[in-house]
Image: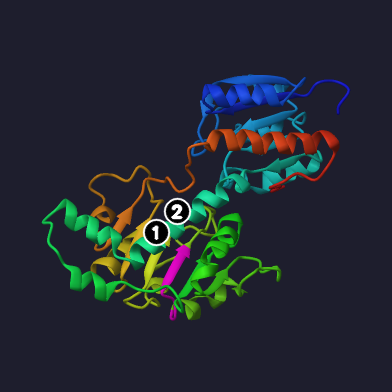
């Protein structure tokens, strides 16, 4: 443990009970709370208090993180780190032998379970039955029975292979589906057949389900575009819990309304919140959740516990979990 207490700056939008847990968990270290709080979806504003910190927890201002040579470790309360994924940030963090970590371990399970729920709901025609309950209350038993599917033997393609995808593969295992994944850099230790982006068009031709978990980045903006959508079968379902910016939404709306694909289940859109008059709301067989995939009742407590586990590792000089830089 350091001879002098570390100063931990926090601008995370935590409720009071999570702050209490944080205070109790850091022991003799000093906690410095920001005046303004930042959610996971918004970057923190500049704060002179950050200059006093050895460690930043939350979503600290990116310019300050780059400039402040005293920061030894930045821990993000999100799985995504797009605003920190820059050459300037990487150079600054590495140049002073600091570290940047995220909270992928916190969000892997809830996001994977959300996708699993989406897949099962579509396979069993649950949203369609709910629509009828809320409208004409017709009893279309024969129609729903014939459209319901067993997952066994169906093909699913996962775009991205981080913590969420790894947990999703575990959840899918009992259903005996044909699983493949796409990632930017194939490492060879993936638990399912994994391919580079150039192989995606061929994989899509045989896919029954496509799960997009791509993060927001310059390289992924609009990456799932009209030509890729055109590879899908009319019976294919598309799911997005990555980021809305990774999909050509106009092309997706057209594909849905023209019945080129079977349907879509979206947890993320561009923009967010989605305007009430946006065509995605009324696209054929489309269901939207308001960016809730990562949410769970004890989310903030788990975020704090994840940080505290890493803090102990930091104090002992051990490798940090979820290290990005």
Quarter of the figure that contains the N terminus: top right
Q: Residue 233 carries which label?
A: none
Q: Is residue 46 visible?
A: no
Q: What scheme was used to colour the molecule?
A: rainbow
List the residue tagged with mark 1. Answer: 118
Residues at marks 2 and 1, CA–CA distance in whole angstroms:
6 Å
**Label 1 residue SS:** helix
List the residue tagged with mark 2.
Answer: 114
The answer to whether residue 216 is above or below residue 306 is below
- The local crowd at label 1, few if under 14, some if 14 to 19, many if 20 or more residues have their Cα within 10 Å, is many
Magenta span = 205-211
Kindly indicate whether the residue at mark 1 contacts the one at mark 2 (C-beta within 8 angstroms): yes
Q: In which quarter of the image is residue 249?
A: bottom left
Residue 54's quadrant in the figure? top right
- Residue 246 % position (x, y): 46, 58
Residue 137 coordinates in the image, percent (x, y): 13, 57
Q: Does the magenta stretch include residue 131?
A: no
Tell me: 176 left or right of 251: right
Q: Please state which of residues 247 and 305 is positioned toward the viewer in this rendering.
A: 305
Residue drawn at point x = 56 percent, y = 65 percent: 169
In this rendering, the answer to whether 281 lies above or below 52 is: below
Q: How many marks?
A: 2
Q: Residue 41: percent from the left, percent from the top?
A: 49, 39
Q: Is mark 2 on a helix, strand or loop?
A: helix
Mark 2, Cα crowd under 10 Å, few <14 / some 14-19 / many 20+, is some
């Amino acid at each position: 443990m350091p001879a002098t207490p570390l100063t931990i700056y926090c601008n995370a939008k935590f409720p009071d009970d999570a702050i209490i847990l944080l205070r109790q968990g850091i022991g003799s270290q000093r906690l410095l709370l920001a005046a303004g709080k930042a959610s996971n979806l918004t970057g923190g504003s500049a704060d002179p208090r950050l200059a006093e910190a050895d460690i930043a927890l939350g979503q600290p201002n990116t310019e300050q993180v780059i400039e402040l040579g005293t920061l030894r470790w930045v821990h993000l309360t999100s799985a995504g780190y797009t605003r920190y994924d820059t050459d300037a940030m990487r150079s600054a963090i590495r140049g002073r032998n600091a570290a940047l970590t995220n909270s992928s371990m916190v969000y892997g399970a809830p996001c994977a379970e959300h996708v699993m729920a989406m897949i099962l709901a579509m396979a069993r025609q649950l949203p369609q039955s709910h629509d009828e309950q809320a409208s004409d209350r017709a009893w279309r038993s024969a129609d729903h029975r014939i459209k319901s599917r067993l997952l066994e033997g169906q093909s699913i393609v996962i775009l991205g292979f981080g913590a969420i995808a790894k947990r999703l593969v575990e959840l899918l295992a009992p259903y005996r589906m044909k699983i493949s994944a796409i990632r930017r850099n194939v490492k060879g230790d993936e638990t399912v057949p994994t391919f580079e982006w150039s192989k995606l068009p061929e994989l899509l031709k045989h896919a029954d389900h496509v799960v997009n978990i791509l993060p927001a980045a310059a390289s992924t903006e609009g990456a799932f575009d009209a030509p890729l959508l055109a590879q899908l079968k009319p019976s294919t379902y598309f799911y997005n819990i990555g980021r809305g910016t990774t999909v050509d939404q106009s092309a997706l709306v057209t594909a849905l309304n023209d019945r080129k694909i079977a349907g879509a289940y979206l947890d993320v859109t561009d923009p967010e919140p989605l305007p009430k008059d946006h065509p995605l709301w009324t696209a054929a067989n489309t269901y939207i959740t308001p960016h809730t995939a990562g949410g769970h009742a004890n989310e903030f407590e788990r975020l704090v516990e994840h940080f505290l586990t890493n803090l102990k590792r930091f104090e002992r000089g051990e490798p940090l979990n979820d290290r990005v830089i």
